[in-house]
Image (cartoon, rainbow, N blue to C red):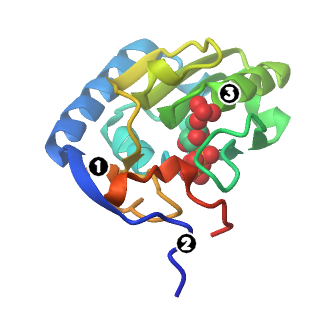
Amino acid sequence: MSDNGMIPHTIKPYLSKEKITKRVEQMAGELASAYIGLEDKTLFLVVLKGAFVFAADLLRSFPLNVRVEFCRAASYGTGMESSGEVRLDLPPEEVIAGRYCVIVEDIIDTGLTLDALINELLRMRARKVEVCALLSKPSRRKVDVPLNYIGFEVPDLFFVGYGIDYAERYRNLDHLAVVVPRDGGDPEKRDAKED
Ligand code: PRP
């Protein structure tokens, strides 16, 4: 069995399930205040795969009856450094056009994925696009992106858990952790390898 391209590492808890839950419930409340009365025109767009856990918790705490759709937006290729190339797989234009779109993301790093996604939604005639992200790493930003609802601003560490992966592992952790390389290695410099 291969190591899926992971370097030897351990993981260290960063944010507990309880702290995440509290913040996610607050965010759901903030969103509800903003979108009450607009339910029929609002679409929550969950960006797979990483946002699936965050979105499941956020939306179950969200009291309004809105449409939920999913999309793929991948910028990392097989390594962990953003390649700058963003692949988008979105719902059809008739679903997007005329709607208030709330993008639900797990983490905003360089901002390249989000920038591409916002531009594409606007091209598809979204009425308005807002962004709700669990984590933001401002120190990594390469492009300025509007973030409307942020769970936590975090330093430039390698996060896993609560939907976020390292080489397709750890998504099912119920909390957030950081990858700590053994032997001083760098998880971002692991060999690129398709999982
Ligand atoms: C992650 C994350 C964002 C993007 C952020 O997705 O979910 O979509 O990278 O990076 P950026 O701000 O540098 O563009 P990833 O490509 O790892 O896919 P996944 O969610 O399927 O794991």
Mark 1 or mark 3, earlier in chain: 3
* Residue 139 sits above or below residue 85 on the image: above
Residues 69 and 3: in front is 3
Mark 3 or mark 2, earlier in chain: 2
Measuring from the top left, give residue 148's x and y in whole percent. Answer: 47, 14
**Label 2 crowding class (10 Å Cα cut-off): few <14, some 14-19, many 20+?**
some
Residue depicted at 77% across the width and 42% down the height: 88
Residue depicted at 74% across the width and 27% down the height: 116
Image quarter (top left, top right, bottom left or bottom right) of the C terminus: bottom right
- State the count of labels: 3
**Label 1 crowding class (10 Å Cα cut-off): few <14, some 14-19, many 20+?**
many
Q: Nearer the viewer, mark 2 or mark 1?
A: 2
Q: Which residue is mark 2?
A: 4
Q: Which residue is mark 1?
A: 177
User: Could you say whether the residue bearing mark 1 is in a helix, strand or loop?
Assistant: strand
Measuring from the top left, give residue 190's x and y in whole percent. Answer: 56, 57
Residues 35 and 110: in front is 110
In the image as oriented, which residue stretches furthest toward the bottom?
1
In the image as oriented, which residue stretches furthest toward the front?
183
Residue depicted at 82% across the width and 41% down the height: 92
* Residue 48 sits above or below residue 37 on the image: below
* Residue 195 sits above or below residue 132 on the image: below
Q: In terms of image quarters, where does ligand 1 lie?
A: top right
**Label 3 crowding class (10 Å Cα cut-off): few <14, some 14-19, many 20+?**
many
Q: Which amino acid is tagged 1? A: Ala
Is ligand 1 less than 8 Å from the beta carbon at label 3?
yes
User: Could you say whether the residue bearing mark 3 is in a helix, strand or loop?
Assistant: helix
In this rendering, position of residue 153 left or right of residue 167:
left
Q: Which residue is mark 3?
A: 112
